[in-house]
Amino acid sequence: MNAAAPASTSAFIEAASPHVMNTYGRLPIALSHGQGCRVWDVNGKSYLDGLGGIAVNTLGHNHPRLVPALQDQIGKIIHSSNYYHVPGQEVLAAKLVELSGLTNVFFCCTGLEANEAALKLARKFGHDRGIERPEIVVYEKAFHGRSIATLSATGNAKVQAGFGPLVEGFIRVPLNDIEALKKATAGNPNVVAVFFETIQGEGGINPMRVDYLQQVRKLCDEQNWLMMVDEVQCGMGRTGKWFAHQWAGILPDVMPLAKGLGSGVPIGAVVAGPRAANIFQPGNHGTTFGGNPLAMRAGIETIRIMEEDGLIANASKVGAHLKAALERELAGVDGFHEVRGQGLMLGVDLTKPCGALVQRACDKGRPISVTADTVVRLVPPLILTTAEADEIVDILVPLIKQFLSE
Ligand SMILES: Cc1ncc(COP(=O)(O)O)c(C=O)c1O
């Protein structure tokens, strides 16, 4: 499958758009279509997609069962409004409840909206208990989104710069340090929740350790705090379990989801357990688009296909293969630090800033991203095969080696 680009399209890409706001440092590429894990740009060049729309395209591109299901839904009803019941919300919520062990779901459209809803839940949880100035524990290097509240929860000065005053009520702690968490919250009656990514994505693929997750769960139980896990990037099967915290055998109280849940159709969800499920009452929270029939169908079909095709097991298997290959090929190379992450959420940490690799990898047909300056991030579709993983390694490793030798 290959489409020739109209000449005018490539000319358009070379010139910066005068009309779209200048919010992204974009590569001079526009994708025209995809098939499986491969995408083609408007000039006909093909790429093996190591980025999956930033952990979004769970089923790859043009999936033979997802696309007809979405076409069917579009032909019936795209949007209705939350003035009415949306049957798809009941179906998808029931599925997310079954997979997570939690009890109730609120639907929205993006990751930051899911996190914003989680933050509101935590604050109201406090207010309902008479805490007038609730405080929420958040983490160094965290990324939770770019609304004013979620960028305040984010632990990245670059994301926050220029947008003060930030929202108050956050206490920031380092990762994987239970004593630091206890010390930062000691004797503070206003703490209501601990909020973190089970594996930090934008912060450089930094996993929370299993024993740390278990200790946080215990502390939240002892203190009557909500444990809120942002699984927007690491959830939905990417790590080889439906949700990354499940590796620790714990249940959170609140879990925001988005990205991979709709395989490309915008969708977000906040899944809550018994302690958080009834905090919102009619009028406390809402959204126009959230939970619309098209997004619900995308979520339902994505999960159905993941189950039918064993994509969780595939993420585990191909992810382990990819990680082992990267570790083997880069072992001993000066400037290579480590490969972090699990399943198909991997970061190759180098000892020097490597943003230049993004363009070079794209030129070679292997789109990647770089996070936290030094980490090459791979979050491909969960349908990636081991042969395709090898194709990524075959191109990426020489590029990294060359870059580190410069
Ligand atoms: C862990 C995490 N939370 C929240 C967000 C924000 O999601 P969105 O861009 O859909 O608002 C992101 C996006 O990268 C993320 O990785």
Image (cartoon, rainbow, N blue to C red):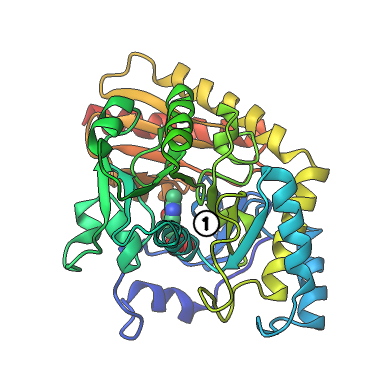
Ligand 1 rendered quadrant: bottom left
The residue where tag 1 is placed is 53
Please tell me which residue lies in front, 163 or 381. Answer: 163
Determine whether the residue tagged by mark 1 lies in a helix, strand or loop. helix
Disc 1: CA contacts within 10 A as few (<14), some (14-19) or many (>=20): some
* Picture coordinates of residue 235, whole percent (x, y): 57, 45
Quadrant holding the C terminus: top left
* Picture coordinates of residue 269, whole percent (x, y): 58, 60
Rendering quarter of residue 87: bottom right
Q: State whether residue 92 appears in this view.
A: yes
Q: What amino acid does circle 1 point to? A: Gly
Please tell me which residue lies in front, 133 or 360. Answer: 133
Classify 373 as above or below 213: below
Rendering quarter of residue 203: top left
Q: Residue at x 32, y 79 (%)?
A: 21
* Picture coordinates of residue 147, whole percent (x, y): 35, 67
Q: State whether residue 33 appears in this view.
A: no
Q: Is residue 259 left or right of residue 145?
A: right
Q: Residue at x 70, y 52 (%)?
A: 96
Please tell me which residue lies in front, 203 or 397. Answer: 203
* Picture coordinates of residue 123, whole percent (x, y): 39, 60
Look at the numbered disc 1 and say if its residue's Cβ is closer than 8 Å to ligand 1: no
Classify 171 as above or below 8: above
Q: Is residue 159 left or right of residue 321?
A: left
